[in-house]
Image: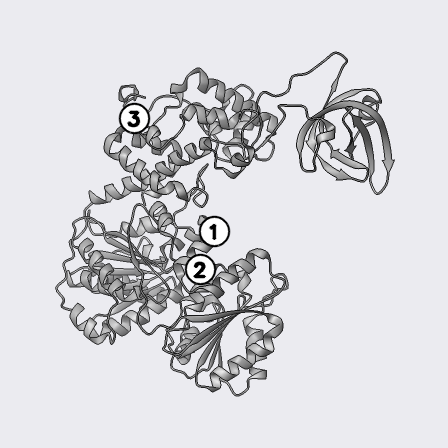
Amino acid sequence: MSEESLNKNGRTTGLDQMPVTALKGVGSRNSEKLAKIGIRTVQDILFHLPFRYQDRTRVVPIGSLRPGDSVVVEGEIELADIRFGRRRSLLVRLADGSGALTLRFFHFSAAQKSALSRGSCLRCYGEVRPGPAGYEMVHPEYLRITEGESPQVEESLTPVYPTTEGMHQLSWRAMAGRALALLQADPAALPEWLPDELLRRFRLPDLTDALGYLHRPPPDAPQQQLLAGSHPAQQRLAFEELMAHQLSLRETRLRQKHLDAPILSATAEWTRPFLKRLGFSLTDAQRRVLQEIARDLQQPHPMMRLVQGDVGSGKTVVAALAALQALEAGHQVALMAPTELLAEQHLRVFQEWLEPLGLEVAWLTGRHKGKVREQLLDDLRAGRVRIVVGTHALFQADVTFHALGLVIIDEQHRFGVHQRMALREKGSGSALPHQLIMTATPIPRTLAMTAYADLDLSIIDELPPGRTPVATVVIPDSRRAEVVERVRSACVAGRQTYWVCTLIEESEALQCQAAEDTVRMLQEVLPELRIGLVHGRLKPLEKETVMAAFKQAELDLLVATTVIEVGVDVPNASLMIIENPERLGLAQLHQLRGRVGRGAVESHCVLMYHPPLSQHAQQRLGVMRETNDGFLIARKDLELRGPGEVLGTRQTGEMQFRIADLLRDQPLLEEVQQAAQLLLEQYPERVTPLVRRWIGDRQHYINA
């Protein structure tokens, strides 16, 4: 499509503007049902692809049938009889000279029984399965054939569409057929936004041809390839959709470069004494990432940088040094964490590091009320508070800053898009704060480059010296007594132990050991040990007191729920017991395991599961036993759980694909990035309509 044919909005009036009600047979009732699954236009119908196909293009001899075949057969009725067993059923014997087949009907009327009389001819479609007297079809679709008649078979494979309540497959096929007819009559109504050069270079079929093929595949189409989503026609559409997401995120990134942000130049006023007091040297990886951040902060446009690092790689030190650069430049810093516990952890660490330098660290959560809150808000507004740590309470409307220069967001994928947008607006005047986003959930590079294309990526790929790999064992909970003895030995030897339960109260459905019951059990069998309990329902002060006692070695054993996933750093803790690990994701297990192995002594993690384990759970626990590499674990997590789970809820609406599948289509991602760059450089007028086609109203979420 030429540039001249675009209207002033950069688009043609076409199938993306035509409502589904323009298709014959789609009235207001059906359009409401379709709207529930996001289908509003004729273009949406075309992009709603079948998930499997039926072969009704040929009549198959009954003698050649195999169990599992879904086929068309034709024959004469030899026998029709009602059988009374556990369920009344109508059995019809159909033969074609090559063999015979039983048709079984559990729901039938007297009229149906009389119509299926001996000597009648039928054409049937159904799935072949073994029965008591040979192969049979249960409730097949059938058509009576009168003598001399030979109804036509289908010319293409029959599509089966994902559907919604009240929408029959016949309706879908009719709608898709009419949408295809409109497209074939006027291909320009669904413009080809990928230029010929790009189609040739990446060996992609034409858009109209790809859609025609997928809605009406020829009889010899490779069904296994279509089922796997790897057919060139499917890959063509996935490629375009992935490109649209990539372009959208890159546009966001380019727009960031045109926005204003304060220039934050370091003076070393606090950085130098901070590094002297630290007590350990930074790793090369930390230094490299800090240089990248320092460069960004000195630019007049907002930094948008994602720092990935495995458990224990030292992201918090990097965040603290970035904060000091902003403070040295006379600006405020806000550090935001998704839970109060994680925010408290950051608060304690930042107070320990920064208060000796004369920098007060404030604390804001939803629990702050009344005069205390009013005073804190007043101090933030006036610039008397320079660094604040908090939860989502930081984005509330009444929180304003004097000169916010840097926002540090920990585990950003656990925040909703509106929250991130709200925090961005807290800058002073037209200047936006710089954003540093941290995650301890390593994301495979290809996925990160696709899902986070709007961010610059830094990876801390080195652990501090002295960290010992944690040896992991997987055992059934029938060996609980052995595990208890192991805990006794470790604690008697002067080491400390975590015992993690996944629920606070007993739940028969989940069969998880409750933390409170576990404490009672352990106190009975280990009376010589000092045992503490931490869970999410404790008051913050109680929780903090117990955690502090454990850190100061006043407790030998800490029983906890998963709240300690991001808990205190206790180098003396060398044993971690995790009950019911099959209930948790790999990333969470890896985070929990990261609580031990922080000292020089050899550390162990015991994954104590409740049998029987599903094959999926066996695979996941096997990965934990075999490796301590967070990036390898993330890759396995991606394979086992899919990208939605791995990325969490980073931005509502962002990673929802119609056709593409990030796991299946990973091999396309590098070429998609090249194609997106080519389009941006050489065909910029096609970018907006391409993004609108695939993302539409969700675009503003991605621009958060």
Q: Earlier in the sequence, mark 3 or mark 2?
A: 3
Q: Residues within 10 Å of mark 3 (few under 14, many from 20)?
A: some
State which mark lies toward you, 1 or 3. 1
Residue 520 visible in rendering: no
Residue type pointed to by label 2: Ala
Label ID, residue 10: 3
From what the image shows, is residue 231 above or below residue 299?
A: above
Element type at mark 2? helix
State which mark lies toward you, 2 or 1. 1
Residue 197 or 216: which is nearer the viewer?
Answer: 197
Residue 266 visible in rendering: yes
State which mark lies toward you, 3 or 2. 2
Residue at 21% across / 70% down in the picture? 359
- Where is residue 522? Give x, y as percent: 56, 80
Quadrant of the rendered structure where residue 682 is? top left
User: In the visual, does 65 lie left or right of 485?
Assistant: right
Q: Are marks 3 and 2 in contact (CB under 8 Å)?
A: no
> What is the C-alpha distance between the residues marked 2 and 1?
13 Å
- Where is residue 97? Give x, y as percent: 78, 24
From what the image shows, is residue 136 above or below residue 530?
A: above
Residue type pointed to by label 3: Gly
Tell me the residue that label 2 is attached to: 587
Tell me the residue that label 1 is attached to: 639
Looking at this rendering, what residue extends furthest in the bottom direction? 528
Image quarter in which the N terminus is found: top left
- Where is residue 661? Give x, y as percent: 45, 42
Q: Earlier in the sequence, mark 2 or mark 1?
A: 2
